[in-house]
Image: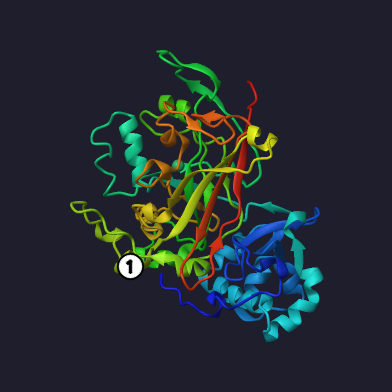
Amino acid sequence: MAITLDETHDAKRKSWVASAQGHSDFPIQNLPLGVFSSRGDTPRGGVAIGDDVFDLKAACEAKLFTGDAEKAARAASATTLNELMALGAGPRAALRKQVSALLAQGTEESKRAQPLAGTLLHKAADCALYLPAMIGAFTDFFAGIQHAENGGKRRGAWPALNENYKHVPVAYHSRASTVRPTGVPVRRPNGQRLVGDDKLPTFGPCLKMDFELEFGVWIGNGNEWGEPIAINQAAEHIYGYCMLNDWSARDIQRWESAPLGPFLSKNFGTTISPWMVTPEALAPFQIAQPARPEGDPKPLPYLWDDTDQREGQFDLELEVLIHTEGMRTKGMPPQRISVSNTKHLYWTVAQMVAHHTCGGCNLEPGDIFGSGTISGPTPDNYGSISELSFDGTQDIKLASGEIRRWVQDGDDIYLRAQGKRDGFVAIGFGDCCARMVAGKGV
Ligand code: CA
């Protein structure tokens, strides 16, 4: 896991790209990877820098890269980043170093890049953003222990956590085909659900629409079928991170989930932030996995690695904001309804990778994991509206005078994440936002 801090993390390094000055999400210390097109041209790999996008293909054609970085930039010139991700950590780190040098003020490299700014940079406002990779598989974990406990209490379970929870990183295989990048509206699904005190199901639109605040993990190079990834090798396979809203139809979920778990309640849409924030960019925000409470079992050996325990978790501030149609009409800004932090996760990402593959399942470049909903210990930290409204029994009062118990049509839900640490420049993940809209009848 250990990533060396270097000149790319230096707080004094500034970019000659004007829009990157003081940018809260994409300063030169971040440099996340994504796929964009500008004014309708062919999608290709880019790097977010301030309010601009740095064109990796154009930079490659201008022969600005050498060695492994050149190999990475060439792979990133494709319409998805799967090929780049398959190259793994080394070329990614080399690319970051050279992009940072090209975009920094006062470097030799910048003298070659800055005169080409007209072809290398595109205004993000003029760009379309896509999923950064063709997603082969999407696995959703359940590593937010407070969310798991809150769900158990809601169901009246005692103990609130299933007996396996502290032993096994619980997950299910979710749906890759319905993952969309920020900005794409999500349609309210129809399905079977019990309404009120009904004993029999009816078919119709979901009446209990929820969001889930999750941390997303992109897989880079995969493993061979039948060959588990040891926990101390997991970092080699993790390519980047995003924010992920696992939209959830709670009424459909409750009726359909026995005994095999969620299906239609989770497969109608998932929203992600389209910029992959790299492990190198997050290195300053790595922390030790918080100690397990007294009495919790020690994970089995295949889930335990001292280095992972020492630095395998992240300290990232998370937020959920809502922007209703009423707020937009009144010209009001989005309103924050939850704050949380990745440090509330009970399992590290390396533990998820080790567990996912321990039976021989192969991961592939472009696979994505969700962490599970990241709630904190107090109600203002809850990462889903079902928790914030105590399963739809309490009003959430908004500044616009509106109330919410569930997500309504026309609501924009934003997830945000930011890393902050003294001595380092803060970085963010960019938007992860989608509007819930009315579904289609059948
Ligand atoms: Ca989830």
Which quadrant of the figure shows ligand 1? Answer: top left
Total labels: the figure holds: 1
At label 1, the amino acid type is Arg
Outermost residue toward the bottom in this view: 108
Q: Give how far across and how far down residue 302 sits, in percent.
A: 29, 60
Left or right side of 370 for 14: right
- Closer to the camera, 240 or 287? 287
Neighbour tally class for label 1: few under 14, some 14-19, many 20 plus, Cα within 10 Å: some
Q: Which residue is mark 1?
A: 310
- Closer to the camera, 117 or 51? 51
Left or right side of 268 for 194: left
Quarter of the image that includes the C terminus? top right
- Closer to the camera, 203 or 120? 120
- Dividing the picture into quadrants, the one containing residue 329 is top right
In the image, residue 301 sits, relative to residue 18, either above or below, namely above
Q: Give how far across and how far down residue 325 sits, in percent.
A: 65, 33
In the image, residue 385 sits, relative to residue 202, either above or below, namely below
In the image, residue 122 sits, relative to residue 108, either above or below, namely above
**Residue under the point 71% across and 57% down:** 36
Outermost residue toward the left in this view: 295
Quarter of the image that includes the N terminus? bottom left
Res. 377 in view: yes
- Closer to the camera, 376 or 232? 376
Q: Report the colour scheme.
A: rainbow
Res. 369 in view: no
Q: Give how far across and how far down residue 334 sits, in percent.
A: 60, 43
In the image, residue 61 sits, relative to residue 168, either above or below, namely below
Q: Is mark 1 within 8 Å of ligand 1?
A: no
Left or right side of 201 for 95: right
**Residue under the point 60% across and 57% down:** 275
Q: Give how far across and how far down residue 125 sits, in percent.
A: 74, 55
Left or right side of 237 for 97: right
